[in-house]
Image (cartoon, rainbow, N blue to C red):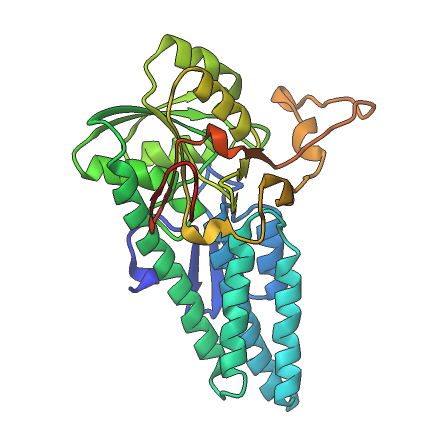
Amino acid sequence: MDINNNKMLQAVTWDDEQQAVILLDQRALPDAERYIICSSVEQAANAIENMTVRGAPAIGIAAAYGIALAAVNAERLEIEISANQDYKLKIINQAFDRLAKTRPTAVNLFTALERMKACLERSKNNLKLSNILLEEAKLIHSEDIANNKRMGELGAELLPDDAVILTHCNAGAIATGGHGTALGVLRSARDAGKKIKVYADETRPLFQGARLTAWELARDNFDVTLITDSMAAALMKSKKIDAVIVGADRIAKNGDTANKIGTYGLSVIAKAHGVPFYIAAPFTTLDFKAETGADIPIEERSESEMRILINNQHVPDSVKVWNPAFDVTPHENITAIITERGVFFPPFKF
């Protein structure tokens, strides 16, 4: 699959001419659709950390391209200073270390890096190492798109012909290689002829639902309505909601799932109202080293994300801030986990 000629909305691409990673700057959405050129590993790492690119699968793809970028730059430097192969490998291994420190919760980041490291070990003596690593990164990207489409087909079968869905954060095309996980299920359901109406949580504090999901769905002509996170219970009580569908950043062996903060509360509300609660995520999101959700590291982000209020007002500095980026939904609150390898129901046996 030619990634760069694919017409789907994409968060991450590789530019062969510039030998650089091109990222859709998701911080600028929905006001502007702009792109950031990353020509160094440090730029790519910063873009992952500051959420220029976000969404577990997209982070993994960006990191894979980051390793390819390190190899390209190392080979260029090798020519300039007549360095040996060991020096080139040292630069590439430094890139692995840097990228691994960017976001701790999204397991796709580490899965992609492990795959790129295995590719490096197989090919480290090859004179065309950068080409080999780049092809591996492109393969990770194209496989993610194919997996999302398969996941979408399987998930669409769970929805009625006329479905009203609530989603949280953004698990769309821009959080993945393309098509999306949770939103990919909705795209596939619509492609299958089903009528889909979507409610999107705004998803505080960075408003990924309001800024990204609402924008992405409106861009694709979905019937989408925005609500605040605190309206979900009232919505389920007053209107018919057929399902909640969200993505995941890491899934433990027992089915506990880490996703954007607020997902756990939404699962409690859904369970109280008898609404099916679905997780849609690629199989690479499973972390078999994590027995339960208690083993999943939860990233805590800067206080500044919560201190700025509407009209540029600020929370007083004397007020403490707790800002976890994710929470863990216990497996008993999950109706099914949708992956490209199948739909898993409790008790979860992957």
Above or below residue 195? Residue 220 is below
Residue 183 vs 162, above or below: the answer is: below
Residue drawn where x is 54% and y is 83% of the image: 124
Q: Say how many tags the image has.
A: 0
The answer to whether residue 230 is visible is yes
Residue at horizontal 31 percent and vertical 39 percent from the top: 185
Q: Residue furthest top?
A: 238
Q: Position of residue 206 (x, y in %)?
A: 57, 33
Is 176 left or right of 53, judged from the image as shown?
A: left
Foreground of the two, 37 or 139: 139
Is 249 left or right of 246, judged from the image as shown?
Answer: right
Single out the residue that lies furthest toward the left. 193
Q: Is residue 104 above or below residue 76?
A: above
Res 221 → quadrant = top left
- Residue 35 seen in the current view: no
From the viewer's side, name the closer residue of 192 and 155.
Answer: 155
**Residue at figure coordinates x 58%, y 52% from the top left:** 48
Which residue occupies 72% across, 34% down?
A: 303
Image spot of residue 93 (x, y percent): 63, 73
Q: Position of residue 92 (x, y in %)?
A: 61, 74
Looking at the rendered image, the quarter that the N terminus falls into is bottom left
| Nearest to the observer: residue 13 or residue 120 | 120
Between residues 142 and 15, which one lies in front from this camera angle? 142
325 on left or right of 28: right
Residue 25 image offset from top left, x and y in percent: 50, 47
